[in-house]
Image (cartoon, rainbow, N blue to C red):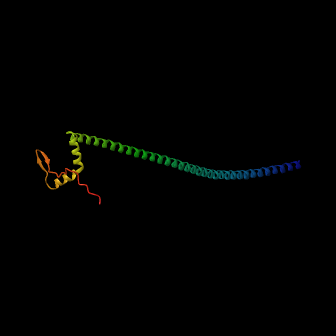
């Protein structure tokens, strides 16, 4: 009995010792596991930060390339539209100017023809005489001379001036 009591006490001591050691091992294991978990979390955060940084850089680079491509496309389209607009403006301006010039010229020609028809109403001989007088004389110079010499006067409510009027062709000069 003494032996069994002693054995039981030794067994109880061993069990207590094993329990203490197991508690210490579990405590150390828990501390180690928590330290490993903390290290793993820190490593995950670091990896996450690196991943986010690299993804951000990749997205920024892709966005910059896409934006650059769009800007070039918009620049090309804008340049094409501006060129088309300028060409259309030049064509419209040139066409409008040509049309206005032709219309104005035709109107002036018709007015001149009507005036000449009225001036030549006394027959072909009178018309021929007017043509000769127009080709032999510079009416503008004659009127300027009349105005500068003070010969313009009023008669019957109209202005009158004695003009120097050539009534024959200039003499032909023989070639040297």
Residue 61 lies left or right of residue 86; in this view the side is right
Residue 162 lies left or right of residue 21; in this view the side is left
x and y percentages locating residue 106 in the rendered image: 31, 41
Of all residues, the one furthest to the left in this rendering is 156
x and y percentages locating residue 92 in the rendered image: 39, 43
Q: Nearer the viewer, residue 176 or 59?
A: 176
Q: How many labels does the image show?
A: 0
x and y percentages locating residue 156 in the rendered image: 10, 44
Q: Nearer the viewer, residue 29 or 117?
A: 117
x and y percentages locating residue 138 in the rendered image: 22, 51
Q: Nearer the viewer, residue 50 or 30?
A: 50
Of all residues, the one furthest to the bottom in this rendering is 176
Residue occupying the point 77% across, 52% down: 21
Residue 3 lies left or right of residue 109; in this view the side is right
Residue occupying the point 23% across, 47% down: 132
Residue 8 lies left or right of residue 77; in this view the side is right
Which quadrant: the C terminus? bottom left
Q: Which of 61 and 86 is in front in this view?
A: 86
């Amino acid at each position: 009995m003494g032996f069994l009591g002693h054995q039981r006490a030794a067994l109880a001591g061993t069990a207590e010792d094993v329990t203490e050691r197991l508690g210490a091992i579990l405590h150390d294991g828990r501390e180690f596991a928590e330290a490993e978990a903390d290290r793993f979390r820190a490593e995950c955060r670091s990896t996450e930060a690196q991943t986010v940084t690299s993804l951000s850089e990749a997205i920024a680079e892709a966005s910059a390339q896409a934006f650059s491509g769009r800007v070039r496309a918009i620049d090309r389209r804008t340049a094409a539209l501006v060129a088309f607009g300028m060409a259309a403006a030049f064509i419209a301006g040139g066409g409008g100017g040509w049309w206005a010039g032709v219309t104005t010229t035709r109107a002036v020609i018709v007015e001149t023809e009507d005036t000449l028809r009225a001036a030549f109403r006394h027959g072909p001989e009178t018309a021929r005489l007017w043509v000769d007088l127009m080709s032999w004389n510079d009416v503008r110079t004659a009127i300027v001379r009349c105005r500068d010499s003070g010969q313009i006067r009023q008669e019957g409510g109209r202005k009158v001036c004695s003009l120097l009027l050539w009534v024959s062709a200039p003499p032909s000069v023989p070639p040297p």
